[in-house]
Amino acid sequence: MRRYFDSKEELQLELAERGWHEWSLLLTARLADARDLTPAQTADAVAGTLAAQPLFCDLLTHVPLSLEGDVDIERARRFKTSSFTSYDAIVGTLTGAGTMTGAQVQDLITVALGLTANLWQISHPTPTLAALYAQNPRWEHIALDFEPRLTRLLRATATGLTAGS
């Protein structure tokens, strides 16, 4: 791998970049014939397509935390260019298929990415934490049901974003 990537951070950033592209493709395919999606249906599509990409979900925590800053500027630029191309496609797909405005969809995506980055980590504890939670279930985090929890929270967000419209 070192022949192709200067560091593990560069490799992980490459995988995150591919994750953005795959998410865009998954969402576009899922919504190919969709029209007039409600905010809840839009949230379902976002949550379902994110949950279908475990590696991307795992990397979402690390991209802004360390990966973007631990590569050279040209690699960071390539990542940003590619991920924003995918982001724009995702926003366009969701806006075109549903009843939410572009600004509302952008806010929904922002919330989705933040929740995914956090809930994915909590929902997939390390072996040490899993053993600890088995010994003391009271400490077990409430977010262990990743996709249903993400879906509920994104539905609430989408509904709230459109309530005044």
Image: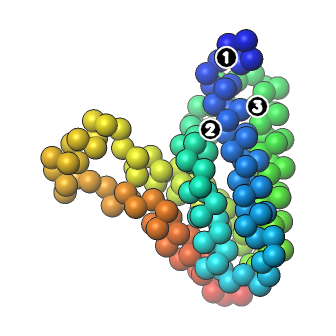
Q: Earlier in the sequence, mark 1 or mark 2?
A: 1
Q: Residue at x 20, y 48 (%)?
A: 134
Q: Amino acid at mark 2?
A: Val
Percent x, y of residue 90: 77, 60
Q: Earlier in the sequence, mark 3 or mark 1?
A: 1
Q: Residue furthest top?
A: 3
Q: Quadrant of the N terminus?
A: top right
Q: Is residue 10 above or below residue 64?
A: above
Q: Residue at x 60, y 60 (%)?
A: 112
Q: Quadrant of the C terminus?
A: bottom right
The span from disc 3 to disc 1 (Cα, nearest Å) is 19 Å
Q: Amino acid at mark 3?
A: Ala
Q: Nearer the viewer, residue 111 or 47?
A: 47
Indicate which disc residue 1 carries: 1
Q: Amino acid at mark 1?
A: Met
Q: Is residue 30 above or below residue 38?
A: above
Indicate which disc residue 76 carries: 3
Q: Residue at x 77, y 63 (%)?
A: 29
**Total numbered circles:** 3
Pointer 3: residues within 10 angstroms few (<14), some, or many (20+)? Answer: some
Which residue was labeled with disc 2?
63
